[in-house]
Amino acid sequence: MEALTTGPLIRDDEIFLRMNLAERIQHILLIVSFSLLVVTGLPLMFYELRIFKSIFSFENAFAFRGLLHRAAAVLLIVDIVWHTGYTVLTRRGRDNFRELMPRGKDGRDAVGLFGYNVGLARWLYRKGVLRGFFDRHPFWKFENPPEYGRYNFIEKLEYLSVAWGSLVMILSGFFMWNVELSLRIFPLWVHDIFVIAHGYEAMLAFLAIIIWHMYNVHLNPEVFPMSKVWLNGRITGHELKTLHVLEYRRILAERREALEAADPVTAAAPHPAP
Amino acid sequence: MRSRGALLGIVLTAAAVLWAAAPAFAGSSDDDCLACHGDSGLKTDLGRSLYVDSSAFGASIHGEAGMACVDCHADLKKLEDFPHAAKLRPVDCASCHEDASAAVRESIHGRPHDGDKPIIVQCKDCHGAHDIRPAKDTLSHTSAMNIPDTCLGCHLERVQTKRGAGFAGRYKESDHYRALSQAGLSLSATCLSCHGGHSVRPVDDPRSKVSRRNIIRTCGECHTGIERDYLEGVHGKDYVKGVQDVPVCTDCHSEHDIRSPEDLDSGVYATKVAGVCARCHDNETMARQYGLRTSRLKTFSASYHGTASKFGEVKVANCSSCHGHHGIRPSSDPLSSVSPANLAATCGTCHPGAGENFSKGKVHVVSEKTENRWGYTVKIVYIVVIAGLISVFLAFIAADLFRRMRTRWKH
């Protein structure tokens, strides 16, 4: 059995497609529109900062900023429409979406990763503190890092945050874009809530990307200076095994099944003779 | 004693004889004067020109009236002995122009200016000497077209007021001067229009045309409709009551370099209006004294209008877009542009189809807590969520780095 999991069914240097071309383009469109939206939007939140004043010092800068902001918003909406269509209409899209749905396991994974990284419980266990509790509830010992499927809780959180954030931003932004329409429907104080939500949601998104996403895909020593998945979409068998071991085991099981179905005798032997 | 009396007798007799003898001799005709003074090279020892341009004099109001040199230079009337004494008595315009002269004597020009070098202003300093023309004549020193240069002849550098160098000269940057010099609009305001002519007085003199007490009337001489609007507005009503801090025309528009609000350098350019109003309306002392609401600028700046304005956008609303300018009324006044009933129409000037919803909420939101409870709730929830999530992110990152460092130490 052990021979099978490390055997030739999945080689360490085998290439798996983690993001196909459509997904990569969707991600790049998201980067472009998000960056533009941040650069052209944040100055409104921090209008006192001199740097923004110097950026927007040319003639008609403010009108240009607004135009760019709305153009980027349209780009983001197009991207989201495409992604939604892709998710609904393609098999791969639907599979990904199902994999991205949060489960109870994600909460346990988050706690598990944090506990494992801190290592306090392991240390206490070794010192003999609360040994009875830890023996009864081995989860809280955080002996091993959590095992992830195709998407870990970090990636799921980011995906769902983008979905929620886009919803809030597009809705509130639409009404800010069309003030007259907004105020034909809502009283001024509701419109003011759109403005407040738009600003704070933007702050949340910006900070989440700058801190959380940038750490996980850039600064994290494991991938530093940058994970290249977003460019070539590729992940090696080794990376699959270390980062997404549940997915790795699933593929392995699939291949073994296929092999057994095709040639049960050969498949049974760990190292088939040439 | 006797000899002196005899001498006087002789002189008087001689004079009488000469006076009677010949009209050709009697006094000096203009030709006599011009015999010397018609020479353009005639100068004093100090180099000051003594030339009199006879054609300029002939075209002047006095020349046209047929007046002779000695009518003004009266002490030469009976002189026959040429050349005459170097020092003549100054011409006394008051002998004819008594009222004007009296007005000047009462004015600041009639008193020696205080300062290092007292200056006494004479009629000729403004009107010229031999080439005096009526003010209607465009060649006159005192015609509207020429008044600025005439006054600035002294006030550009030589004579400075308390407001410092160049204060008067800034008139040339004004739209009043532009209208005068470029559009050739002689009705445009010159120095004279605001400061008066002969009876010009310093600004702190209550009788001055530019004193706080009179400035509204003075500007209103031309800007009649604006004066009326102002007096009907909240500022004008307090002005009439004599409130000292209430803004008058010059407080917002400046004094000499008044420019059109469309001019980027104007103090009331769209993006600068808020700053002008805030001088009083964000001033704690004044707010306490007159019961004004503060934080007007702060709350405006935080709004989209204010933010856009800070970035130089002129199309967005500034204070005056909603509140009006000259005839600003409090929102409690049914005629006010910001009275609840008129808000839809006021907002509608920029936001077509603005309806009643525009008035259902606060514009200058000082405290969301009391003025927009739901908005406040959303804000607080966001702050808590942002602070919480970012803390969690940082904790995870710290834990991750902690484990990696620990592993490195072990190996």
Image (cartoon, coloured by chain):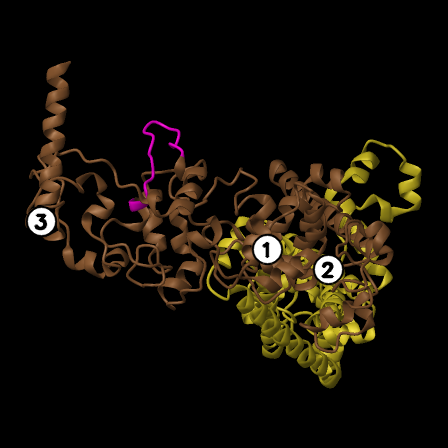
Dot 3 alpha-carbon crowd within 10 angstroms: few under 14, some 14 to 19, many 20 or more: some
Instruction: Indicate the position of residue B27 as horizontal and vertical percent values.
Output: 14, 45
Q: Have a look at marks 1 and 2 and say if they share a chain.
A: no
Select label 3 or label 2 by which is in front: 3
Tell me the quarter of the picture where residue A172 sits: bottom right
Magenta stretch: give its range: B111-124
Q: The yellow chain is which one?
A: A
Position of residue B17 relative to residue A42, above or below, is: above
Q: Which chain carries label 1?
A: B
Dot 2 alpha-carbon crowd within 10 angstroms: few under 14, some 14 to 19, many 20 or more: many
Q: In the rendered view, does A66 fall on the left or right side of A1?
A: left
Position of residue A147 relative to residue A137, above or below, is: below
Q: Which mark is residue A45?
A: none
The residue sitting at 61% across, 72% down in the picture is A70
Q: Which chain carries label 2?
A: A
Q: Mark 3 points at which residue?
A: B32
Q: Which mark is residue B273?
A: 1
Q: Which chain is brown?
A: B
